[in-house]
Image (tube, rainbow, N blue to C red):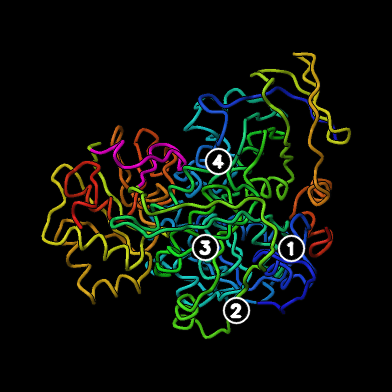
Amino acid sequence: MTLTGKAHIPKKQKDDINTDYIISGRYKFKIQDPNELAKHVMEDLDPEFYGRLQKGDFLVAGKNFGCGSSREQAPQAIKYAGISAVLAKSFARIFYRNCFNLGLPAIECDTDGIEEGDELEVDLNSGIIKNKTKGREIKISPLPRTMQVLLADGGLVEHFKKHGGFKL
Amino acid sequence: MGKNTRSERSRTIAEKILSNHSGMDAKAGDIVIADLDFMIGQDGTSGVAIDSFRKMNAKKVFDPAKIAIIIDHSSPSPNEGVSAIHKKIREFAKEQGITLYDIGCGVCHQLTPEQGHCVPGDLVIGADSHTCTYGAINVFSTGIGSTDLAAGWISGKLWFKVPETMKVIYKGKMPKGIYSKDLILNLIGKIRADGATYLALEIEGSPIDEMSVDARFTISNMAIECGAKAGLMRADSKALDWVKKHSRRKPNPQEADKDAKYKEIIEIDVSKLEPQIAKPHTVDNVCPIAEVLGTPIQQGYIGTCTNGRLEDFQIAAKILKGKKVHRDCRLIIAPASKDILMDMIKDGTFQILLESGAASVTPGCGPCVGTHNGVPSDGENVISTANRNFKGRMGNPNAFIYLASPATVAASMIEGKIADPRKYL
């Protein structure tokens, strides 16, 4: 799977971006439509974030991305905002699971050299990210097999529809 | 609770419980598919789980007796959007014959152990990150997302990566005015928000042995705030007595083997600890109280799955008895369950707190998640017994949240500013 798009880095904070920042509790309780929810992604941290996105772009962050609550609305809002993958130095574990359950790749890699607007090409098979703007390559930590299966099936819902249960 | 498995290796509590539920000799790093003893969802996460359940073309949950949904996060409903979610949950619970704890019953993480749904040795999942709370009674319980919960409803199973374990050993005598909340805030400040990511914690030592089970829940509850998957304690006689009072199920307590392998062992002496405060806007931004003494406060909150238990309110009532909440601030209280509220009424704690000026809201999450019951205004400072102080957490990104023990919140209410509880004890 090869994905291309621009990098978007939430303003103000790189590390420990929590699920309350990704989608605030005051929206996740009220709004059930994921397309509507997506419009508020990162709002408390970076109100212009959603406006900068184009379909297929990447969300890029530092360490411990998605810490905090278990709300699946967090990766859901990111996915429905059109983001094709999240790149971070590390992820909080519930958020990490939720991404793959929704078929959204969460990729652990060194994000230090990536800047807002950089053109990226992410190749999940070869495990290489090409930063076309900077002319650099970044290696991706290999995905665990369980995650590869979930991504190949398009998420846990599709996996269950296909197999009727866990076949990991 | 699974059948006890044998192994030639020395194992941690996490490895034992996950082995017993998967029938494998599960060691750290393995991925296992394990049988679940109980699973919960709440009103913020169950709506999405119901959507996933339907999308998976499922018709029936695998065993209604092992499932509960708790309407606690935004309860009673503050608006029509939430009402629609609550309605969907009520209809689903009725259709599937699963237990529903509706408005006013309390917070999921109080009700699950209090109503006897989990016992030592169990494996429990919850679509709420603070599901790790029941580690205090030796349950491997962990937070997961809504689609994982739907998969559990359908199959009775979930996949787990067996975590490595970090052991935390507390030592020394707890000084007066220091509570379990101070211990866990201090730990999170030390190892930071990602200090235990992908790991289970095993927490032990004489201060843990000496504290009540209520106080232990506070510590396990906040394991997730340093990224941990579980916050496990051994089941001593105090824990087993507590469980016996609340559940008819037979416990299967698990202890770590002597030579079990740990990723890291941390020792903490509590004897010189001061009251701890987590400053805005992260839980790991922790300092001793001296650094923030005198910070003006407009709202106090005592409650939540962290500190909404009987003992927490008794501690606050002892400090507030015969005194008034300062005119410049307001105090909100939310008992973590209806049973706790009734106990507070019986022993006079409730009256003391109301007489001091506290406003009591429905047993449940109260203002913690920012949907209702006390959203602070721009520029206001809140001192709360909750587990999170993220920007916007209580519904306003322009407010500032400080986290502390119930004693520190109570003392601060008297002075209208952050105050040291030790002078009121």
Q: Are marks 2 and 1 on the same chain?
A: yes
Give the answer, above or below, for where A96 lies relative to B358.
Answer: above
Could you tell me if the residues under marks 1 and 3 are in contact, i.e. CB atoms within 8 Å?
no
Amino acid, disc 3:
Glu
Residue B112: give x, y in percent of width and height: 50, 70
Chain ID of residue with mark 1? B
Q: Nearer the viewer, residue B28 or B67?
A: B28
Report which residue position mark 1 lands on: B57
Specify the farthest residue to the top: A134
Q: Quadrant of residue A15?
A: top right
Q: Earlier in the sequence, mark 1 or mark 3?
A: 1
Residue named by callout 2 = B65
Between disc 2 and disc 1, the foreground one is 2
Secondary element under disc 2, as helix, strand or loop, is: helix
Query: Which of label 2 and label 4 is nearer to you?
Result: 2
> Residue at coordinates 78% horizontally, 58% vertically from top-left?
B31
Circle 3 is placed at which residue position?
A: B204
Q: Label 2, label 4: how many angstroms apart (C-alpha)?
A: 33 Å
Q: Nearer the viewer, mark 3 or mark 2?
A: 3
The residue at 70%/64% (across/down) is B15
